[in-house]
Amino acid sequence: MTTVSLLSIAETERESGIHRDTLRVWERRYGFPAPLRNERGERAYTDGQLNRLRLLKQLLDCGMRPAKIIHLDENTLRQLANQLNETTPVPALVDSLLEALIVGPRRSLEQQLEELLQKNGLRNFLIEVVAPMNHAVGDAWFSGRIGVLDEHYYSEVVIRLLNAELSRMSKNSGYPRVLLTTLPGEQHGIGLLMAACMLCLEGAETFSLGVQTPLDEIVRGAVESQCNIVGLSCSEYMNRRTISSQLVRLRKLLPAKTSIWAGGSGVSKIQYLPTNIQLFAELHQIPSAIEAVKNKVI
């Protein structure tokens, strides 16, 4: 007898990037996803539903409306997603790394990344290798080309490499002082490490709280550490409306003198935020932003 793997609503939210409240609304309004129920009567989702939800999330982030696509089957959704991906060519180097992740052996990917770090230096490694590779891995995960195992393995390799680089950097006090974390619900931490590396390269001092820090604790950490900036990493897995609302709330809670910097693919299409919230579409914007902050002090 075959055992069907089922996911809770919390797991489905995490793996699809779609908030659980949205899942419930879609269930009532569109009839999808129509979850099963476990022995406790709680919603339970199949792998097939998760695959469709991932594709829906990818298409919604490109501007499509749920009512237009939610009833399409997985193959049709995948075709639409592939058409969108074809408009954004993947650099040959990234394509080679992605192939190593998919086909293996896994050690080959790790060796290639280590060699690229040594060859290019940390700054160029972050901008020219890790940043585009993150996008490619995310697209491959959403489209079903890779699984959770592959995505987690890639993340762990990059995290190990970046942590090693950070440990070798000077721990002397710098300016500005930046508190780094993610918003509640954001579990991906690679962006935090990338930002920490770039900031340290520019002479900033960083304090990392890890992922998913409650807003009131972010405020407490920023105040107690006398930070000039709160830096937030927002991935494409998190709903942009949720990101926007939490940024607005955090802005109200923080002292006026403390800036908010938010970066990552999750903020790429966000507009109309309060003043003193600066959005970063790309890593290479960090050096000029740090320079501007330092010039204000002079």
Image (cartoon, rainbow, N blue to C red):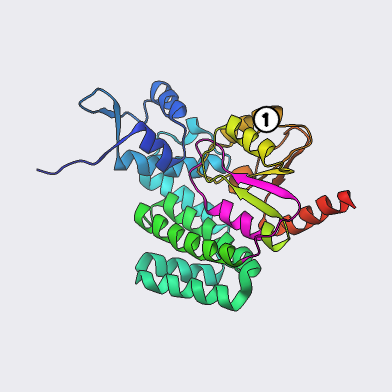
Q: Is residue 74 above or below residue 110?
A: above
Residue tagged 1: 248
Instruction: Name, please, the residue furthest toward the right.
Output: 298
Q: Residue at x 40, y 34 (%)?
A: 71
Instruction: Name, please, the residue furthest toward the left.
Output: 1
Residue 30, percent across and down? 41, 25
Please state which amino acid type lies under the numbered disc 1: Val
Q: Residue at x 87, y 49 (%)?
A: 297
Q: Secondary structure at mark 1?
A: helix
In the displayed structure image, the side of residue 51 where residue 137 appears, left or right: right
Label 1 packing within 10 angstroms: few (<14), some (14-19), many (20+):
some
In the displayed structure image, the side of residue 281 where residue 266 appears, left or right: left
* Rendered image quadrant of residue 92: bottom right
**Which portion, as a residue range, is magenta?**
169-198
Q: Is residue 54 above or below residue 275?
A: below
Q: Quadrant of the N terminus?
A: top left
Viewer can see residue 162 = yes
Q: Is residue 183 magenta?
A: yes
Q: Residue at x 60, y 29 (%)?
A: 216
Q: How many marks?
A: 1
